[in-house]
Image (tube, grey):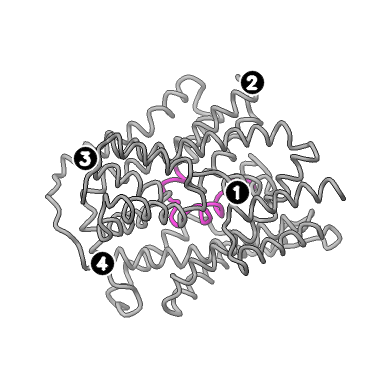
Amino acid sequence: MTTPSFIDAARVWVQIGFTSFGGAAGQIAMMHRILVDERKWVEEPRFLHALNYCTLLPGPEAQQLATYLGWLWHGTRGGLFAGLMFVIPGALIMLGLSFLYVYGGHLPLIAGLFFGIKTAVLAIVAHAVARIASRAFRHRLFILIAVLAFSLLMVADAPFPLIVLGAALFGYVAQPHMAHVFPPAAQDVEAQAPVTFLQTFIAILSWIGVWWIPIGVIALALGPTHVLVTIGVYFSKLAMLSFGGAYALLAWLAQDAVSVKGWLTAAEMADGLGLAETTPGPTILVTQHVGFLAGWRAPEPFSAPVAAALAALVTTWATFAPSFLWIFAGAPHMEQLRANKRLAAALSAITAVVVGVMSYLAVWFALHLLFAQSGWYEMGAVRLPTVVLASFDLQAFVLSALAFVLIMRLHWSVVRSVFVMAALGILTRLVF
């Protein structure tokens, strides 16, 4: 491994931060091309070693991978710079788009822009489902796990975190009895220098402080029930349980932020995902749009723009700060985790759950995109989705079908497809 200077590495992290479109898969592929193939700053086994560890963690694995590689070369300052630069450019662009959304969303041009983006979301999610399913379904058991997760969310409205934790526990417990079903753990594990309990404890305590002190200061200044505190606690909880990437996390957001807390509507959630897909950085930046709208609608004692900007900042901090804890405290133990067969089995079960969760998300988006009126018919603990057929949106259906063709059949990139659908959305709203 050829260790770059901090300045050389910083230049590359800035480049990646402003050009890392395409979600986690595209971002990881970009880092591999630049850092492994072109710069040769890290060997292939070491890159995959770090990637496998980050996949085990909750939160955005691409940002965690960047943080790990920065830490590998230049310690804490390298990890901080890499992780922050992976997020800040996209977060600033997302903030600007959110302001455009609230100030100009009623104008035909802007409304058409967001309508077109929203029609691409369904195809984007469906494509992600197909991609992950192709890796997850190694055995019929994983298909069963995915179907069960989908059913628990759709019919029983089960809490998303409990489904994920239940699947992880099942994989961990079942692995010794079903070793042939689960994939083997990595074998090419390199020796690591021993890490003391005290070192790990200090790292955990330090980064928990960095994560929670800003939220505590806000609570002291504005009170524990203020919306900024609620947002900070909520998205911190989300970050600790967001296995499976942004699409899986959206199922929880759909349940809580839309249906329970009322921070935004289902349509606004779909708009936020579309915006996140058009910006560099992690797709999980959709959470920033959610926090922005929550702050906009409960601004006291600030003005709406100030409250929304602060809420976006708090959301982004609570979403990404935990990743630094996982990397700086956990990376020294990476070898042991990667070689653990039972942890690998737990991850496999979680991946299967993610397929079911994302399938539920696709259905949820479809109901709200294609029908102006939709809801749930409840029979005790069981519920079923309902729609009003007369509220069917033909324009949304046609544009969504076209997005499916572009992404699923013609294999266009997500960014290219979103821009085309945004243009068609503007044309549709201006003409019809």
| Residue sitting nearer the eye, 368 or 429 | 429
* x and y percentages locating residue 310 in the rendered image: 54, 27
Kindly identify the amino acid type of the residue bearing the numbered disc 3: Phe
Q: Left or right: 62 with respect to 180?
A: right
Q: Nearer the viewer, mark 3 or mark 1?
A: 1
Identify the magenta region.
237-258
Q: Nearer the viewer, mark 2 or mark 1?
A: 1
Kindly identify the amino acid type of the residue bearing the numbered disc 2: Ser
Q: Nearer the viewer, mark 4 or mark 2?
A: 4
In the rendered image of this protein, does residue 47 appear above or below residue 345?
above
Kindly identify the amino acid type of the residue bearing the numbered disc 4: Ala
Q: In the structure shown, which secondary structural element does the residue marked by tag 2 occupy?
A: loop
Q: Left or right: 170 with respect to 336?
A: right
Corner quadrant of residue 166: bottom left
Q: Left or right: 295 with respect to 397?
A: left
Q: Mark 1 = which residue?
A: 273
* Between discs 1 and 4, the one toward the N terminus: 4
* Between discs 3 and 1, the one toward the N terminus: 3
